[in-house]
Image (cartoon, rainbow, N blue to C red):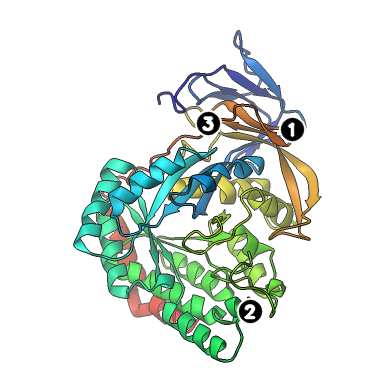
Amino acid sequence: MGTRHGHTRDLLLIRGGTVVTAQASFRVDVLCGGEGEILAVGPDLDRPTGCTMVDAGGLLVMPGGVDPQVDIGADKAGFARTVAALSGGTTTILDTMRPDGSGLDAAWRDWRHAARHAHVDVGLHMALPDASASVLRHMDELVADRGVNAFRLSMADGLSDRDILQLTRHAADYGALCMIEAQNAQAVAYLRAELDHAGITGNEACLLSAPPQVEGEAVGRAIMLAGLAGGPVHVGPVSTIGATDILAHARLRGQRVEGHVLAPHLVVDEAVYDPEGDAASDPCVTLPPFRDGTHRRALWGGLASGNIGMVASGFRPSGAAGNGVTDGLAQRMRVVWQHGVRAGILTAEEFVAVTSQAAARAFNIYPRKGAIMPGADADIVLWDPDALETCTSGLYAGITLGGRAVRVIRGGVTVWQDDMPCEGVGYGAYVPCPAFRPGLSERMRRAAHLSMRDGEIQDRGPGAC
């Protein structure tokens, strides 16, 4: 597989822990090779000469986390903050670049230059502003030459249904998929204007301008449009009962649909919105907004059932374009462990699925990422399952987090230990996301059209909430 991080390193043998993957848990050893790969997994592995041994007794040994949605863009300072992701057990992020009018290839080059400052491995989703001939042409080049296999389409920014249809079909033809940020932009804008007219301008306007029906309608419409185009689709972030129900129904009908939730939507309550709060600077102002416990329970149910496949941090540096939160890279996996696994909603294996493997599979970087098996990248987290901590500040203030990354290994090198980055932690590698296998788009198209029979998907969308 080649040297993955630019140089060779010492062999590393992890012994005495319980390896947890999305499939099962085993008491086995893991041997990491000199080029950043896993060489062997098995009981009582021999220790090669000159190999460093790591004692994982009493700890869980899991694949490094894969965060499927961050919005850093071409921001060197934002990437410098990704050391926080290492502290929480995340070793790979999938970032979004939003072109500023200079063209998709120029945007990719700007992003690639900034991403060299990341302390984790990074892949890219490219946001698309429209379906112009130039955009369509450069989509093909990004898939074929740049390792981009997912494109972000934002209903929240007003992208038209016609453009979504054309972009989804075009992406599928080239072995890529579209991620749709599903919010009814016109409804949100209208409600926001009405709130402004009524003098409601505090951060509670974030909640009141995006009620659950707005998201439910848009998720249903996004899935319907993807079905008409015959392409696979990823929607999210989702935050409501209605959106969760629509995802489940589409998957039961056979449509290839993935979805994700942001970690704060699993634990942060709508009570964070202060009528007097400053909507311009409050870290809780995001779309979709945080909601009450009824919706949060549905999101956990979606994760437990597999209808919502993965959990993202939604990290966005302050002032950056797009929606997201300015905190949370470090807390993503700890939120899911405490309020999912320790609460009895998820198993340890399901934890690995929603924080690592599902995203790696969805974006075609599995088993390089999200796996502990020979040939996979040696991105490994030694996890203390019993650790507890209550946050005292920031977005998660007052919320208890569970589990702790005792040691984080990225590409066979320890980069986080003893609650601090290791000296010379260095930078991560670019992770190209390959196009999906030939013939996939045609099979997806057939499955999507079959799922649309009798109009059942369409009928679920606009009326759900």
Q: Amino acid at mark 2?
A: Gly
The residue tagged with tag 1: helix, strand or loop? Answer: loop
The residue that appears at 49% across and 52% down in the rendered structure is 72
Q: For label 1, count other residues whose C-alpha is less than 10 Å away and answer few (under 14), some (14-19) or many (20+).
A: few
Displayed quadrant of residue 25? top right
Residue at the disc numbered 1: 418
The residue tagged with tag 3: helix, strand or loop? Answer: loop
The residue that appears at 61% across and 20% down in the rendered structure is 12
Q: For label 2, count other residues whose C-alpha is less than 10 Å away and answer few (under 14), some (14-19) or many (20+).
A: some
Q: Nearer the viewer, mark 1 or mark 2?
A: 2
CB-based contact (under 8 Å), mark 1 and mark 3: no
Q: For label 3, count other residues whose C-alpha is less than 10 Å away and answer few (under 14), some (14-19) or many (20+).
A: many
Displayed quadrant of residue 250? bottom left
Q: Is residue 39 above or below residue 359?
A: above
The residue that appears at 63% across and 52% down in the rendered structure is 332
Q: Quadrant of the C terminus?
A: bottom right
Q: Is residue 456 above or below residue 235?
A: below
Residue 140, position as x, y percentages in the image: 24, 50
Distance from label 2 to label 3 (Cα)? 50 Å
The earlier-in-sequence mark between 1 and 3 is: 3
Distance from label 1 to label 3 (Cα)? 26 Å
Q: Amino acid at mark 3?
A: Met
Q: Quadrant of the N terminus?
A: top left
Q: Amino acid at mark 1?
A: Asp
Residue 288 in sight here: yes
Residue at the disc numbered 3: 373
Residue at the disc numbered 2: 202
